[in-house]
Every structure is written in C-alpha cells, then in structure tokens.
Amino acid sequence: MSIPVDIDNLEKAIDKFGATAYLITTDNEAHPHITHVTLSKDSDGFVCYLGRKTSANAAARPSVAMLWPPMLPGEHSLIVDGLMQVTEIPERGARGLFKPKAAILHRSASGSEKETAGNCTSDCSPVITERR
C-alpha cells in the first residue's frame, strides 16, 4: 500500500516519526557515515547539532540523507534527501541546517508482493519533490 504525502505535509510526516533520525553523510572515500541526530524546526529547514566527523563530512559534501526507520515491523520508513549547511559553534561543536529536497515513504518487500515497473517489490511512495 502506498501513502501519498504532498510537500506541505513533510513536517507532519516528520512529526509522526519523531524528532530523532539517522543522518547519513559520506567521507572523502565515499564511505557512508551514519549518526543519530535530534532535529528541531527552523524557518529555513531543520536544525541539528553535529559531531566532528559528521560536520566535516557534511561541510565537504552537503548532499545528505535522513532516515527514520519504521516504528513497527511492516510499516514504512521515511527517507529524506537534502542539503546540510554546517556552521561551527565554539561552545557546541557544529550546527547543521538541513534543507529537504525530496522524500519517500518506503516499505521493504515482503516477498509476496508483485514486482512493480521498476523491478522492485517494495511500495515506495514520494513525499515531496524539489521546489523550484
């Protein structure tokens, strides 16, 4: 089952999944680095505080992803791609401003579902598309 969510409902989707997510960055050799962050809403996007390695990765390669795993087995995950702007703050380390670009609700294949046109047995559903 797909659950369509338009761009105006991204904040509601994030509220449903909670303020904590996994932030995925990459290092100089394109290895993924995953850390857990707590987000708060800002007028320009979502704010989180970053550790030394995460902030260095995001400053050098600002294309990042956020992942909220499903709350219960069989439910959808929320995956949001976007850009991270890093600001160094001496007393706190680094502040990240996450600006979402696109998102999907994704549920893994159960093995019994038919393949879709993309040869995928999941039922991914777009949440937002990039605003121009």
Image (cartoon, rainbow, N blue to C red):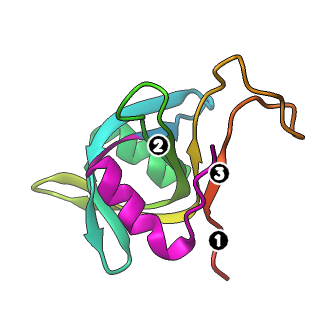
Which image quadrant is residue 106 in? top right
* 119 up-or-down from 63: above or below: above
Q: Amino acid at mark 2?
A: Asn
Q: Is residue 9 magenta?
A: yes
| Residue bounds of the magenta highlight | 1-22
Q: Amino acid at mark 3?
A: Ser
Q: Nearer the viewer, mark 2 or mark 1?
A: 1
Q: Is residue 89 left or right of residue 82?
A: left
Q: Residue at x 83, y 30 (%)?
A: 115
Determine whether the residue tagged by mark 3 lies in a helix, strand or loop. strand
Q: Is residue 119 visible?
A: yes
Q: Is residue 92 magenta?
A: no
C-alpha span from label 3 to label 1? 15 Å
Label 2 crowding class (10 Å Cα cut-off): few <14, some 14-19, many 20+? Answer: many
Residue holding disc 2: 57
Q: Residue at x 69, y 33 (%)?
A: 122
Label ID, residue 125:
3
Q: Earlier in the sequence, mark 2 or mark 1?
A: 2
Q: Position of residue 74 (x, y in %)?
A: 49, 28
C-alpha span from label 2 to label 1? 23 Å
Which image quadrant is residue 117 in? top right
Q: Residue at x 46, y 49 (%)?
A: 58
- The quadrant the N terminus occupies is top right
Q: Earlier in the sequence, mark 2 or mark 3?
A: 2
Determine whether the residue tagged by mark 2 lies in a helix, strand or loop. helix
Determine whether the residue tagged by mark 1 lies in a helix, strand or loop. loop
